[in-house]
Amino acid sequence: QVQLVQSGAEVKKPGASVKVSCKASGYTFTDYYMHWVRQAPGQGLEWMGRINPNTGGTNYGRNFQGRVTMTRDTSISTASMELSRLTSDDAVVYYCARSDSLDYWGQGSLVTVSS
Amino acid sequence: QSALTQPASVSGSPGQSITISCTGTSSDVGTYNYVSWFQHHPGKVPKLMIYEVTNRPSGVSNRFSGSKSGNTASLTISGLQADDEADYYCSSYTSSSTLVFGGGTKLTVL
């Protein structure tokens, strides 16, 4: 069965960077885009970007251009998302999700930003 | 890329049908048949309910159906049940090779 298992919660200081990972299993990792989506408490879903695990090619949302980097390691079927220059607005839950239909989701990773 | 437009809230009584709209532009919903709908219960992971405008993933009740006309996609839930009460989001692929979400609709089952 398809599973996406994300890394655990993180606590970061303002201005720092955070890296969240997403380990895929149950399917061929390189066959589907991996997307990253975030949600602030009480707010809607926000698309951050996607990576093609086969080529490494990326597309980023306008709000994150220049601040987000998505990578993958095909040897361990893992996609990662790094967000830099963190502010309090980045203290939200981050999800990875498979394919352009977002058919399977990770469990979410909470990032706290606090001095 | 602007967010897709959804009503903030809709409501219905058990057994009734409701429809949630999702309005985009010719750069997203109007051109691409990559519209998805998600159900999100607070504190849980979003769940895909409809993909590619009309398709239901395995395991999703046939009470959920999707459609599209022009720049507007719609999700219809028939035979409303208490457990359908949740937030619903649409998403669409765009001409910029990105995805865009709607702002979300809170469904209340009266």
Image: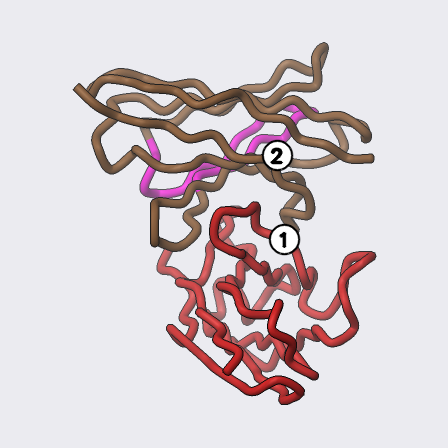
Chain colours: A brown, B red
Q: Is residue B49 above or below residue A84?
A: below
Q: Quadrant of residue A68?
A: top left
Quick one: B87 or B76, which is closer to the camera? B87
Could you tell me residue A70's position as x and y percent? Answer: 49, 24
Q: Is residue A57 magenta?
A: yes
Picture residue at 66% right of the left edge, 77% below the top: B67
Q: CA distance from mark 1 to mark 2?
A: 16 Å
Q: Which residue type carries mark 1?
A: Lys
- Range of residues picked out in magenta: A48-65
- Chain letter of mark 1 equals B
Q: Residue at x 26, y 25 (%)?
A: A113
Depicted B21 relative to depicted B16: above or below: above
Which residue has dot 1 on it?
Answer: B47
Q: Position of residue A89 (x, y in %)?
A: 24, 37
Image spot of residue B47 (x, y percent): 63, 53
Numbered mark located on residue A34 in the image? 2
Q: Nearer the viewer, mark 1 or mark 2?
A: 1
Please provide percent x and percent y for residue A14: 20, 21
Secondary structure of the residue carrying tag 1 is: strand
